[in-house]
Amino acid sequence: TYIVTDACIRCKYTDCVEVCPVDCFYEGENMLVIHPDECIDCGVCEPECPVEAIKPDTEDDTDGKWLALNSKYATEWPNITVKKDAPSDAAQFETESGKLEKYFS
Ligand code: SF4
Ligand code: F3S
């Protein structure tokens, strides 16, 4: 499966949702997640993200932390299939690291 990781937090550009053939993105306040059981591994969303937040779970070097987070919130947050405006201050968070600890909600 593919997963959404730290870079998405407070950027949330939502380009990814438009291309997913199975509509498996879910929206939280500060980021999106992918439902791992619905993702068909097509990979088309990965290059769409301007901040490279999307990657295969095999490239998750955090001992499964991001896969677990995607799994958990995909069942709690609403589905999103249409692109929307990013937060007005999204650009200032593009290169920040460790956003999960600072901003996740
Ligand atoms: Fe959707 Fe394909 Fe991305 Fe999975 S890899 S989330 S199926 S676009
Ligand atoms: Fe997030 Fe990138 Fe999609 S910033 S909302 S994963 S396009």
Image (cartoon, rainbow, N blue to C red):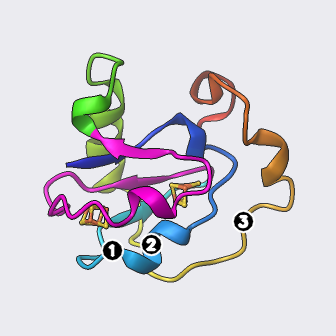
- Cβ of disc 2 within 8 Å of ligand 2? yes
Stretch in magenta: 30-56
Residue for point 44% across, 72% down = 17
Amino acid type for the residue under numbered disc 3: Ala
Helix, strand or loop status at disc 2 = helix
Q: Nearer the viewer, residue 62 or 103?
A: 62
Dividing the picture into quarters, in which one does residue 26 lie?
bottom left
Residue holding disc 2: 17
- Cβ of disc 3 within 8 Å of ligand 2? yes
Q: Are marks 1 and 3 in contact (CB under 8 Å)?
A: no
Q: Position of residue 99 (x, y in %)?
A: 64, 29
Q: Residues within 10 Å of mark 2 (few under 14, many from 20)?
A: many
Quadrant of the image where one finds ligand 1: bottom left
Residue holding disc 1: 20
Residue 20, compared with residue 10, is above or below; it is below
Q: Are marks 1 and 2 in contact (CB under 8 Å)?
A: yes
Label 1, label 3: how far apart the Cα atoms are: 18 Å
Q: Is residue 105 visible?
A: no
Residue holding disc 3: 86
Residue for point 46% across, 39% down = 5
Helix, strand or loop status at disc 1 = loop
Q: Is residue 98 magenta?
A: no
Label 1, label 2: how far apart the Cα atoms are: 6 Å
Considering every residue shown, the one lying at the far bottom of the view is 82
Q: Position of residue 70 (x, y in %)?
A: 33, 44
All told, the count of numbered labels is 3
Q: Is residue 34 magenta?
A: yes
Q: Nearer the viewer, residue 99 or 51?
A: 51
